[in-house]
Amino acid sequence: MIGALRVRDVVGAILVGITYRAPMRRWIGLTKYRLNLLVLFAVGGGYVTASGREVDAVGAAFAALGAALSAFGASALNMVMERDFDARMDRTRDRPVASGEVSPRAAVVFGVSLLLAGLGILAAKTTWTAAAVSAAVALIYLGLYTPLKRVTTLNTLVGAVPGALPPVLGWAAAGGSLTAPAPWVMFGIIFFWQIPHFLAIATVYRDDYERGGFRMLPAVDPTLGLCARQVVLNTVALILVSMAVVAPAVGLCGSRFLVVALASGAVFLAFAMRFAWVRDVATAKRLFWASLVYLPVVWAFLVIDRIPRA
């Protein structure tokens, strides 16, 4: 497919729609930029925690740019792969490729261009290890998670891996060693946070996912009993992993972070248990919003507590 493309196609795609008559917003929509804000958030946290007392602002900017472009490119390619399934679902049928406003061929060129640009920036301006982590994110996301969504409910666990790797990427971009426990504790926080977060979304849109042919756990769990257990267990695991941040072997934060993490975790767990008890769309929505509050609070305090004080 890519080999048959003409120069006009490549230039048109990269210049965001000059050749193809799709509005600018549709090309921007290919990047899933709202969802990928989490990537920048996580990469920044990993970079700052690895930097210690002195943060290289230029290096951090290149790490964020490279990670963002890679994530944007992978998202565009994901939309190409899932275009027929997205077209069946109310929440995704208006996506650029599914709606037909951007052709699959143009979206492939656009996605590959962004992905390669991001990997190149990471390799040239940060570290090769960071570029390798970013490549692994794209490979797992596109090569495993995307096809598994139509095969097994375990896709959520697989998808949580690339979703949790951005802080590891940020740590590596700052020159941190991946043999240290700290980046993997940060990985664990985002990994376990994603399970209740995405199961809440899948519960709200369970009928839509079923129409789209995606095997999300709430769509194949009529009573939501198994889904409820997974939400609670992974929330408890999240709290336990967040406590490891203050362990001497990790050494990321002090006791003040522990207070914030435990308090935030207790509130989040309360929403998770409420969902497990009631198991309806209303409590799933509340759990979703609680997850959107929990992670920024905990992550921001982790970074702030790491920044040295005058």
Image (tube, rainbow, N blue to C red):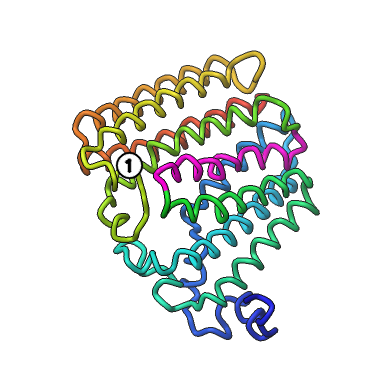
For the C terminus, the image quarter is: top right
The residue under label 1 is: 200
Residue range corresponding to the magenta coloring: 152-176
Q: On the rendered structure, is 299 left or right of 130?
A: left
* Residue in front for this viewpoint, 108 or 197: 108
Q: Position of residue 207 (x, y in %)?
A: 25, 54
Above or below residue 110? Residue 17 is below
Q: Quadrant of residue 225?
A: top left
* Residue in front for this viewpoint, 216 or 241: 216
User: Could you tell me what secondary structure mostly forms the magenta stretch?
Assistant: helix
Name the amino acid type tagged 1.
Answer: Ala
Q: Quadrant of residue 218?
A: top left
Furthest residue to the front?
151
Above or below residue 225? Residue 156 is below
* Residue in front for this viewpoint, 65 or 85: 85
Is residue 88 a member of the stretch shown in magenta? Answer: no
Above or below residue 109? Residue 288 is above
- Circle 1 crowding by C-alpha within 10 Å: few under 14, some 14–19, many from 20: many
Above or below residue 66? Residue 310 is above
Q: Position of residue 73 (x, y in %)?
A: 59, 62
Judged from the image, the secondary structure of the residue bearing numbered disc 1 is helix
Q: Residue at x 64, y 66 (%)?
A: 112
For the N terminus, the image quarter is: bottom right
Q: Residue at x 42, y 78 (%)?
A: 100
Q: Position of residue 15 (x, y in %)?
A: 62, 77
Q: Position of residue 223 (x, y in %)?
A: 21, 38
Q: Residue at x 66, y 35 (%)?
A: 48
Q: Residue at x 63, y 57 (%)?
A: 70
Is residue 175 a member of the stretch shown in magenta? Answer: yes
Q: Quadrant of residue 233?
A: top left
